[in-house]
Amino acid sequence: MQTLNHDWYHILQVIYYRHTLQSLSVSANGFKSFYGGIVNYERVTNDAEFVLHCELKLILSLTELHPPTVLGISKACCSLCYEYIQSLNKSLQQNGRPTWLIGGKHQKCYLWACPNNTSAEVKVGLDAVRKWVENRILAMLEKCQQKLSFTESPSQRDDDAEQGDDSPMELW
Ligand SMILES: [Zn+2]
């Protein structure tokens, strides 16, 4: 597992710069005014709160013992597990191998962890999850920049923040 960097604004700046080669114009408070759920990230003080979800635990345990099969999970996958498994399945299919079968997915994200080992399969899954998270963050930053570029009164801005399309709790 990787150690959590608690400076969430620095992470946003780095992701934005990597993708656009521009500096982020949204301030930390500007981002917070639209995505108040980011404060949940500040509340996480122990890296151990990030857990390996049961779908991935099963896959990682079974990979050495059994070909991909149906995973009997009673609940829909979270977005991150879903991205991981979809990308892993795509890679398996390309190699003519069977795939992991899962049910649907829901839109929420929870504290999520994956062992950062060197296996090719884990790397495929982690790369897909990283890409998905970064794209979500970029979309949120773009939305913030668009909304903050309008000239509007602080009260209008508060209204927008409450009615944002993405629930801040969903991603964080
Ligand atoms: Zn999950």
Image: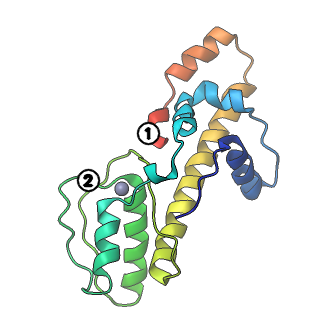
Quarter of the rendering containing residue 30: top right
Q: Is residue 124 visible?
A: yes
Residue drawn at point x = 20 percent, y = 72 percent: 70
What percent of the width, then of the height, locates residue 3? 59, 58
Name above or below for residue 156 compared with residue 132: above
Q: Nearer the viewer, residue 48 or 162?
A: 48
| Residue found farthest to the bottom | 96
Question: Does the residue at mark 2 contact the one at mark 1 (Cβ under 8 Å)?
Answer: no
Q: Nearer the viewer, residue 92 or 29?
A: 29
What percent of the width, then of the height, locates residue 28? 71, 32
Q: Amino acid at mark 2?
A: Ala
* The label number, if any, that marks residue 71 in the structure image: none
Q: Give the mark, 2 or 1, whose residue is nearer the N terminus.
A: 2
Q: Is residue 166 visible?
A: no
Specify few, some or many for label 2: CA neighbours under 10 Å numbering under 14, 14-19, or 20 or more: some
Q: Is residue 134 left or right of residue 50?
A: right
Q: Quadrant of ligand 1?
A: bottom left
Q: How many marks?
A: 2
Name above or below for residue 54 compared with residue 41: below
What percent of the width, then of the height, locates residue 154? 68, 11
- Note whether ligand 1 is within 8 Å of mark 2: no
Name above or below for residue 61 compared with residue 155: below
Secondary structure beneath disc 2?
Answer: loop
* The label number, if any, that marks residue 170 in the structure image: 1
Residue drawn at point x = 31 percent, y = 53 percent: 105
Name above or below for residue 55 compared with residue 118: above
* Location of mark 2 (residue): 76
Quarter of the rendering containing residue 77: bottom left
Specify few, some or many for label 1: CA neighbours under 10 Å numbering under 14, 14-19, or 20 or more: few
